[in-house]
Amino acid sequence: MLNIFKRNKAEEIVRAPVKSGTAIDVLVVESDPKFLLHLNNMVRTAHMPDNKSYFEIDSAGSLREAIDKLTERRYDIILTDVNLADASGFLVLEELVEFCNHVPIIVLSNITNWSMIIQSAQAGISDFLLKKTLDPDILMRSIFYAIERNRLELKMNRTEDSYQSLIDILPLGLFRIDSKGNFSYANRIFADMVGLPLKGIEDKRFKDIITSEFTEKFQNALDKIIAENTKVEIEIPVQRENELPLTLLCIGTPLHNDLGEVEGIQGVLVDTTSQKQIQAEKHTADTLGALQSGLSKMANELNNSMGSILLDSQNLRDSDVSDVSEAAIKRIEAAVQKARSVLRPFLVSAEQVGPRSEVLDPSKILTPIIEEIKASLPDHLQIESHISDQLESFEGDASLIRKMILNVIHNAVESMPEKGNLSLHVGMDNLDVASSLCESLDLQPGRYLHVIVSDQGPGIPPHMFQRVFEPFYTSKEQPHSGIGLTETLGIIKSHKGNVKMESYVGKGTQFHIYLPVYECKARTIPKTEASNSTQPPSGRRTILLVDDEANILMSANMLLRHFGYQVITASNGADALTKYSEHQSEIGLVITDYSMPVMNGPALIHALREMSPSIKIVLCTGLEMQSSMEGISALELDGTLFKPFNATTLSEMVSKQLGK
């Protein structure tokens, strides 16, 4: 190293405070030896804030020598003239900038040409000092400033590099657009997401790139960011040619100028397609789990009902005592009704069937429910019930009403893992036009059956009220299917009613159920025992009974004969047509099943109408799905029987068609 400050004892190494305990390496590119000595004197007489640091100065007399030194080692600062022995002017700066490896450069020159000074700044020179006006303090301030600014710039560059590498790693599409929607920046990942080359995005508008049904919605979101100075999130479906559809989440925030005004938008685009798929798969898994749980419970209840039927069948076979037989028959009827009530709520809540219209006595429905709940209630809970003796009959489906009340009570039980009380209160309410409930619950003015189920559970915060009736949602710690209240709401709505929930955290929850009560005439249901005295209808009193289920065919045949009718049976539609042709003059009513081999019920009905348009036809079916009901409504029927039905229902239907 050539260090001009070591030439004699008087010219000792100049020490100046820049970096604590570390020498500052300076390269002076200067062809004039006299100026090197002058520079030595300046440094030696300059005011230094810390004597622990010092300069080590190396020199180069030509551009070529300077470049050789720069390729061999790194310096902290370069001081250079623009007039050297082998080069001059802007060429010196260009070459030094290329080889300096981001080392700050200060020009020391007597040139006062402003064009040269501006070119130096544009080339990245840290400072331009005139030799003839140079003094030690100005030189030191310029060196310290250049080194510190360079250090900060390198730190910032490293931060930007780290930031950019992070952006390149993370699957984030970044963009900036101005207030008119034109792009001012977009990264490569953004371009890949929208399926365009990065250069193709420049000078385009966002709505021209994101083409989907949500374009207008997204433009409104961008306008909102600018107008309201707020953040907006929106999902954008993107469909590229020959590729699977994508779901992109766009998060946009306002971009401000120096005055704090919104001048554009900066945002992030995230591909959430996989996340959506995972959520959908989880939802499907939850749904299947809930269905499996529900089907397991349903199978258990059906097995219980069938077990009771089988046992009582044996009792009837082995017993000759009339009171035992009567009790067994009642248990069998109850078991069948319970089995029916297990299935229908699932179909109604899924809007696959509508509720059956029956005249119901609320007390007869509620009393068995209360007894059932008391028998199964955990030891740490007690139930209080109050059933008004002024309840009015209403039209509905008994099995669904039973399921609805049980669901709400079970929900209350599950919300109370510790000791507490729950209550069931049932009465009548009159809602007039001025009632706030009519508007809030969308109810018509009139008389309503009012069911209140209360618990002393932890309660539900207000922000969760809307989610209580969502499928598969539950706030309970233990796993639950999350479909009980959803099913309940479906049943209530199917009966033209509604439900209101009141809950307070730490105090419990109340469900208020309102079911409309219409004016209805109670039907006089004839008893089977009295049918012996019923005279057979005059005229054609023979019934053609068609069903592919042998047991149903035999049981219905026995009942109809017991009621005093003549019966001809057929196992399918084709067989029925043959027998109808043979006994057409005798047959006054045809009762046919819907689903049968060879020829089904609808095909048989069409054929019978062509043969005898006035013949009375009743369809008997176990199908109540909406799709099936649409097909049934298109048939020319005189009546419909839904399985399972009892002897009374069958007797009423036949009497209605053939007359007393």
Image (cartoon, grey):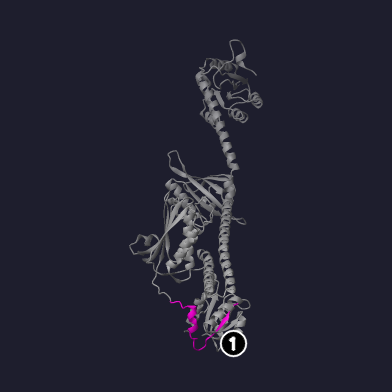
The single residue placed furthest to the top in the displayed view is 9
Give the percent coordinates (x, y) of residue 627.
54, 70
Q: Nearer the viewer, residue 279 or 434?
A: 434
- Residue 513 visible to the viewer: yes
The single residue placed furthest to the left in the displayed view is 434
Give the percent coordinates (x, y) of residue 406.
48, 61
Residue on which disc 1 sits: 581
Is 532 in the magenta? yes
Q: Nearer the viewer, residue 179 or 88?
A: 179
Q: Nearer the viewer, residue 659 or 474?
A: 659
Q: What residue appears at the point 59 percent right and 73 percent down from the top-left corner?
A: 318
Classify residue 502 as left or right of residue 235.
left
Give the percent coordinates (x, y) of residue 102.
59, 30
Q: Considering only vertical position in the picture, is 5 above or below 659?
A: above
Give the amino acid type for the residue marked by disc 1 in the picture: Ser
Is 567 in the magenta? no
Q: Considering only vertical position in the picture, is 656 above or below 297?
A: below
The segment highlighted magenta reads 524-548
